[in-house]
Image (cartoon, rainbow, N blue to C red):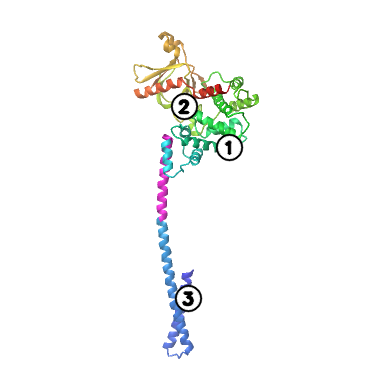
Amino acid sequence: QPSHRLHHRLHTISVMAAAVEVGEADGMHSRHGEHELLLQIREQKKQLADEMQELKDAIAEIQRELNELDENSGDEEAEADETSAKVRAAKKEFNIKPKKGLKMLIECGAVEDSPQAIAALLFEGDGLKKGATGEILGQNPSLWADVTDILDAFGRLHDFQDMDFDKALRAYLWSFRLPGEAQPIDRLMVAFAKRYMECNAGKFSHEDTCYILAFSTIMLNTGVHNPAVKNKQTLESFISMNRGIDQGKDLPPELLTDLFNSISASPFKLPEEEAGLSYTFFNPERAGWLQKEGGQHKTWKRRWFTLANNCLYYFESPESVKPKGTIPLESLHVRECTDAKRQHCFEIIAEQAAVGKAGAKGALSIKGAKTNRKGQIVLGKHSSYKIQAADRTEMEEWIKCIRAAMQKDPVYEMYRLKKLRVT
């Protein structure tokens, strides 16, 4: 090492100089050359001493720079930790209030404020819930103009080239979760149809064909795999419901047959975060804990209720994979009711019972489904479902949401309206 070598040279010269000086002190008569040598040795010693000092100064300067680097590194790490904390907080907010959370992500530098960058963030989905992503993508363009470009960029991130229709639809619906309202669903499915046609030109005669087929495929999935549906959809009915959707012409029967067989063999699946709601693609219109009275045994049990896709599901807990029971809301009625021992109760009954005589109520049963102790899906034995909320406000909100769900089916409505325009 330089410092060690300099020390060694300095020590050697010092020894030589000392020897010469000792010789002179002992009365040795040095010649003129010896005197010159002594002067040279002294000069070299001085030069080496200067070099050593320069080296020490350089080492000191390097040490100062290293210390400054350590300090800066510490500041950068602290800054990185602070940024990371802001990103985590922004993602948490996104999963609760998507639009506000997205603004926070932009402000903390987690994503550039451009449609392409935002679309990539949503597509990658790191730490973002699928339901929140669907809510952002389904925003009304009249209230947020940028969402049109974001949705378009999001669609282009999907590569549907030479992909079977149902596989493309599965991939698309895996990347977010469809909202429960009709208009956002419409915008999202229009984007799917546009992208699928870009990747598979000539597959259908028009984007509307792709759009309608996507909705009928979603309804097929529900009609085949939803335990609440008693009369399962058949291949014949699926082909019939898609007649004339290709600009007035029929799609090839083999295409519809392959699609039917694929969906029948393998239902659409959702990411793990949505596992408890695997029977529906839509964000729940309402979800929460309620008390439910039993059918045969009039005991009350706490259940996690989810209102979605025109059905009311109840689970053991929010993390449950399969519902304990399903109540299809078609032809049912919901109203407030009284209970001798409990407050804030409402009941779901058949429409005929709601308007008929009190004595007729017991003869009408609701076609609900539930899971028995063996895990088998069986028909429920309820003439009504009596449910208790925590307070009056919550009870009124549940009644309001259930009534709204009884009056609409957003998937079918979008399918019906588009089909009317093309057939």
Which amino acid type is shown beneath numbered disc 1? Asp
Q: Inspect the magenta stretch and tell me whether residue 368 lies in it.
A: no
The one nearer the camera, 391 or 183, is 183
Which amino acid type is shown beneath numbered disc 3? Arg
The residue sitting at 51% across, 28% down in the picture is 186
Distance of label 2 from label 1 (alpha carbons): 27 Å
Q: Residue 220, located in which quarter of the rendered image?
A: top right
Residue designated by label 3 = 9
Q: Inspect the magenta stretch and tell me whether residue 76 lies in it.
A: yes
* Residue density around tag 3, few if under 14, some if 14–19, many if 20 or more, within 10 Å: some
Decide whether the magenta segment is chiefly helix, strand or loop.
helix
- Give the magenta range: 72-98
Label 2 vs 1, first from the N-terminus: 1
What is the secondary structure assignment of the residue under circle 2? loop
Total marks shown come to 3
In this rendering, would 267 be left or right of 104?
right
What is the secondary structure assignment of the residue under circle 1? loop
What is the secondary structure assignment of the residue under circle 3? helix
Residue 257 image position (x, y, % from top left): 63, 25
Q: Quadrant of the C terminus?
A: top right
Residue 159, label in figure: 1
Verify CB contact (< 8 Å) between mark 1 and mark 3: no
Residue 1 image position (x, y, % from top left): 49, 68
The one nearer the camera, 230 or 91, is 91
Residue designated by label 2 = 181
The one nearer the camera, 34 or 282, is 282
Q: Residue 396, located in which quarter of the rendered image?
A: top left
Which amino acid type is shown beneath numbered disc 2? Glu
Residue 207 image position (x, y, % from top left): 58, 29
In the displayed structure, would residue 43 be above or below residue 191? below
